Amino acid sequence: MERHSRAHLMRGAISLGAVLALLSAAKTTIAHAQAPPRSDSTIPLPEHPRPDFQRADWLNLNGQWRFRFDQKDEGEKAEWFNAALVAPHSILVPFSWGAPLSGVADSADIGWYQRTVRVPESWRGKRVFLVV
């Protein structure tokens, strides 16, 4: 992908779908565990992003994520996706960096998001989809 195209994509508003698309560039650990209790008051935009596709079982991935700028576009080559981000910021998803509500000022064209996702034990053996 050209740098201009990547920068344009990354600067767009990040919805749940866009965050899920970023999972291929960010290391996300998926583990079966009991889902922790969820307080919708701590998750921005807790409602389902696409009411026409809402299902009974779904996870909202909005909230605090680890984030790091990649000013030199070296993260992929250095395999940042294989380890915890070094000196990360905390960013509030679904807001993109540069948006006042994200908590991260715009200072580069490329950024990495990272978060651990726990799949509820009740989903074991079921098909799980990440919708982009």
Image: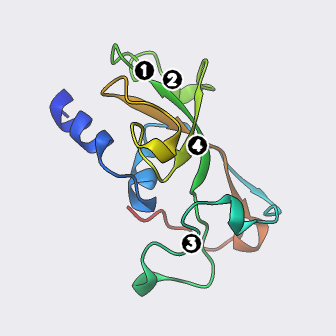
Tell me the residue at 56%/46% (across/down). Answer: 92
Task: Report which quarter residue 15 is drawn in.
Answer: bottom left
Q: Is residue 43 above or below residue 115?
A: below
Task: Tell me whether circle 2 and circle 1 mark residues in contact (CB < 8 Å).
Answer: yes
Disc nearer the start of the sequence (1/4): 4
Residue nearest the viewer, comparing 119 with 9: 9
Disc nearer the start of the sequence (2/3): 2
Disc nearer the start of the sequence (2/1): 1
Disc nearer the start of the sequence (3/4): 4
The amino acid type of the residue labelled 1 equals Gly
- How much space separates mark 4 and mark 2, taking CA atoms? 12 Å
The amino acid type of the residue labelled 4 equals Thr
- How much space separates mark 3 and mark 4, taking CA atoms? 18 Å
The amino acid type of the residue labelled 3 equals Arg
Within 10 Å of disc 4 (Cα), the crowding (few <14, some 14-19, many 20+) is some
- Quadrant of the snapshot with the C terminus: bottom left
Within 10 Å of disc 2 (Cα), the crowding (few <14, some 14-19, many 20+) is some
- Quadrant of the snapshot with the N terminus: top left
- How much space separates mark 3 and mark 1, taking CA atoms? 31 Å
Q: Is residue 63 above or below residue 55?
A: above
Tell me the residue at 56%/68% (across/down). Answer: 128
- How much space separates mark 2 and mark 1, taking CA atoms? 5 Å
- How much space separates mark 1 and mark 4, taking CA atoms? 15 Å
Residue 36 visible within the image: yes
Residue nearest the viewer, comparing 68 with 132: 68
Residue ID for mark 3: 127
The amino acid type of the residue labelled 2 equals Trp
Q: Secondary structure at mark 2?
A: helix
- How much space separates mark 2 and mark 3, taking CA atoms? 28 Å
Residue ID for mark 4: 28
Relative side of 53 to 128, left or right = left
